[in-house]
Image (spheres, rainbow, N blue to C red):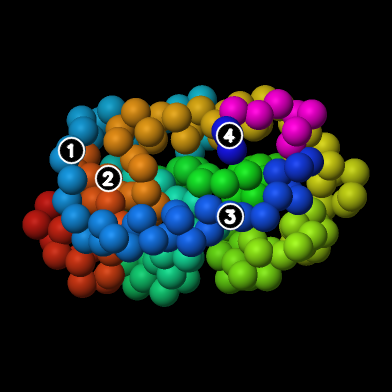
Amino acid sequence: MSLTLNRRHVMSLAGAAATGLAFSGNVAFAQSRSADGSVDAAKVAEPGKLKEMVYGKEDAPVTVVEYASLTCPHCADFTLNTFPKIKEKYIDTGKVRLIFREFPFDPRATAAFMLARCAPEDRYFPMVNVFFQQLQQWAMAQDGEAALLQIAKLAGFTQESFQACLTNQELLDDINGVRERGSSYGVNATPTFFINGQKYAGSLSVDDMSAIIDKLL
């Protein structure tokens, strides 16, 4: 299914089952820990139209750009299990800045990203974490709209604001734009990381990422 959608179709995003769930994770797993070319580090870190969601200091010597899908099991594993250790070791100490970008592999992931973007900015990452924590419950639910609404209500959404978010054509276009930009850099699996411009497709462990970052410090 094309991700170039208009708002007449957006509510179906929430209802459509995340058929890409296994696909997005398995592709990433197959390419785990592979260094796969590079792009200009400044270019890939350059802000796009949609506000960047960032951890860390702007002047950190290492910049990590992560492309993820909210229905990707390996993205969930990285965010919930690996990232906290990387954050403590490198981000909180001023060594790494991480830019998190949307790369939805299926319609339901697109809907979830839209909801995270519609929340107050300080709730974006908490919502992303909840979506990853409850991945199986909402991504594979028969009634995706109801499952997403339940999570959204925890973040303060009403039925009206939920529907308004998922019919926001400009936001949908902006998220599609983030995804298209990632594709232009060769992203075709999630998670994909660019660490000072070097591309790594697939899940990285704490040791994997530490080895890469340490060489750049």
Q: Which residues are magenta?
A: 4-10
Q: Quadrant of the N terminus?
A: top right
Q: Quadrant of the C terminus?
A: bottom left
Q: Amino acid at mark 4?
A: Leu
164 part of magenta stretch: no
Gap in angstroms between the C-alphas marked 2 and 1: 8 Å
Mark 3 crowd level (few <14, some 14–19, many ≥20, 10 Å Cα): some
Disc 1 secondary structure class: strand
Decide: marks 1, 4 in contact (CB < 8 A)?
A: no
Q: Which residue is mark 4?
A: 3
Q: Amino acid at mark 2?
A: Phe
Residue 67 is situated, as x and y percent measured from the top left of the image, at: 41, 46
Q: Which residue is mark 3?
A: 19
Q: Of the two numbered discs 2 and 1 on the same chain, state the one appearing first in sequence.
A: 1
Q: Of the two numbered discs 3 and 1 on the same chain, state the one appearing first in sequence.
A: 3
In the visual, does 146 lie left or right of 112?
A: right
Residue at image position (18%, 38%) is: 38
Name the front one of labels 1 and 4.
4
Give the camera-side residue of 50 and 19: 19
Residue 52 is situated, as x and y percent measured from the top left of the image, at: 48, 38
